C-alpha cells in the first residue's frame, strides 16, 4: 500500500514542479498464477506480473496523459514530465472542472480474499485435476481440448493534487474448460464453461461436468430447412448479443460520438418488458 501511494505522490509532485496546475497519478500492480490444460493433460504452470503508472497533468484547462510500466524514480519523473508537456500542447477543455477532492468514499466489500492470495501452485494443480477428471468421467466420447485454472492479486492507488490518496486491493480466481465430443465421424464444435469469482468459491467439478454435458448434447446435430423459427439463447450467446447491441450503446463515449442507437432516447421504451438490466460491477 505505502509503496504505491508514495510513488503516486512523487509523480504528482514532479508534474506540479514542472508547471502543471493540477496532477493525478493512477498506479496498478498485479500478480497471477495459471495452470494450463491442453488435449486432456495439465501441461504448464506460469506466473506473471504486471504494473503501471498513468499520470494526468492539467495546464490551462488542457489535460495531458502519459504512462509507464516501469516503476523506477527515473521513469516516474519522465512520465510526469511527458504528461505536463502533453497538456501544454493540447487544446483546453471548456468542460474541465477539476480533479476530485479528498472526501468520504464508499468502501467496496467482497473483492479481496486472503485465501486466494495464499494459494500455492500445487493447490491450483489439484483444482485443475479435479476439473479435468470430472470432464473425462462424464462420457468417454468427450475430450478436454483446453482450459485451466488461474488466480490474480491486484493493487491500485490514486493520488492527486487535491488531496486524494486512496488504495485498494482485490483478488480473482477462475477455472474454465473447453471440450469437444467425438462419436465415430460425428465431431462437435468446441463447447466452453467457466466459473470465476472474486473470493475462493469456485466449483471446478461442476465446470468439468457442464463442459462435458454441452459437448455430448451437440452430438447428432442435423440440418434443417431455412425459415423463421423461435430461438432459445443460452446465456453465453445472449450475453454476446447484448454486448454488441446494447452495452456499447449505453457508453457515454459512443453517445458523444453519435454512434449510439440510444442517443436522445431517454424516457422512450427501447426494449421488451421481459428484459431486466442489473447494473452491478461486483457480479
Image (cartoon, rainbow, N blue to C red):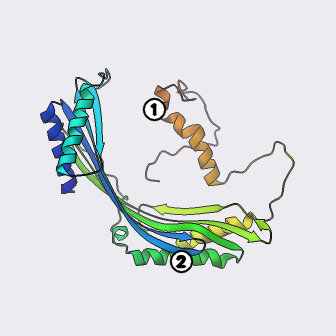
Q: Which mark is residue 26?
A: none
First along the sequence among labels 1 and 2: 2
Quick check: can you spot residue 102?
Answer: no
Q: Are marks 1 and 2 in contact (CB under 8 Å)?
A: no
Residue at 66% in and 72% down: 143
How many other residues sit within 10 Å of disc 1, few (<14), some (14-19) or many (≥20)? few
**Relative to residue 144, is residue 151 drawn left or right?**
left
How many other residues sit within 10 Å of disc 2, few (<14), some (14-19) or many (≥20)? some
Residue at 80% in and 68% down: 185
Please tell me which residue lies in front, 138 or 78. 78
Is residue 224 positioned above or below 184 on the image? above
Q: How far across and down, in percent of the image, does residue 197 sit? A: 45, 62
SS assignment at label 2 = helix
Query: How many numbered discs?
Result: 2
Q: How far across and down, in percent of the image, does residue 137 sit? A: 65, 79
Please tell me which residue lies in front, 98 or 34. 34
> Residue 178 appears in which quarter of the rendering?
bottom right
Q: Residue furthest right?
A: 225
Is residue 155 positioned above or below 54 on the image? below
Residue behind mark 1: 252
Residue at 20% in and 32% down: 22
**Relative to residue 35, is residue 272 drawn left or right?**
right
Please tell me which residue lies in front, 70 or 262. 70
Residue at 48% in and 68% down: 149
As measured in the structure, the alpha-carbon distance from the residue carrying label 1 to the one carrying label 2 is 43 Å
> Residue 99 appears in which quarter of the rendering?
top left
Residue behind mark 2: 130
Amino acid at each position: 500500500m505505502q509503496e504505491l501511494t508514495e510513488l503516486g505522490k512523487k509523480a504528482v509532485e514532479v508534474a506540479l514542479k514542472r508547471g502543471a496546475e493540477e496532477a493525478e497519478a493512477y498506479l496498478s500492480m498485479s500478480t497471477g498464477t495459471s495452470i494450463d490444460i491442453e488435449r486432456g493433460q495439465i501441461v504448464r504452470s506460469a506466473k506473471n506480473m504486471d504494473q503501471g503508472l498513468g499520470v494526468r497533468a492539467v495546464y490551462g484547462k488542457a489535460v495531458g496523459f502519459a504512462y509507464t510500466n516501469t516503476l523506477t524514480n527515473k521513469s516516474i519523473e519522465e512520465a510526469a514530465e511527458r504528461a505536463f508537456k502533453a497538456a501544454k500542447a493540447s487544446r483546453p477543455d471548456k468542460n474541465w472542472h477539476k480533479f476530485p477532492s479528498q472526501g468520504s468514499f464508499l468502501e467496496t466489500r467482497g473483492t479481496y480474499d486472503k485465501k486466494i492470495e495464499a494459494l500455492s501452485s500445487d493447490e491450483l494443480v489439484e483444482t485443475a485435476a479435479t476439473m479435468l477428471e470430472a470432464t473425462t468421467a462424464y462420457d468417454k466420447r468427450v475430450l478436454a481440448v483446453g482450459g485451466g485454472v488461474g488466480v490474480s492479486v491486484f493493487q491500485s492507488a490514486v493520488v492527486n493534487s487535491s488531496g486524494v490518496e486512496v488504495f485498494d486491493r482485490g483478488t480473482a480466481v477462475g477455472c474454465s474448460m473447453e471440450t469437444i465430443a467425438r462419436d465415430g465421424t460425428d465431431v462437435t464444435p468446441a463447447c466452453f464453461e467457466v466459473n470465476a469469482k472474486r473470493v475462493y468459491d469456485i466449483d471446478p467439478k461442476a465446470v468439468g461436468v457442464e463442459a462435458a454435458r454441452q459437448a455430448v448434447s451437440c452430438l447428432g446435430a442435423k440440418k434443417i430447412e431455412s425459415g423463421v423459427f423461435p430461438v432459445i439463447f443460452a446465456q453465453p450467446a445472449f450475453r454476446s448479443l447484448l454486448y454488441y447491441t446494447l452495452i456499447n450503446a449505453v457508453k457515454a463515449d459512443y453517445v458523444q460520438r453519435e454512434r449510439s442507437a440510444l442517443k436522445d432516447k431517454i424516457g422512450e421504451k427501447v426494449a421488451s418488458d421481459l428484459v431486466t438490466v442489473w447494473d452491478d460491477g461486483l457480479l
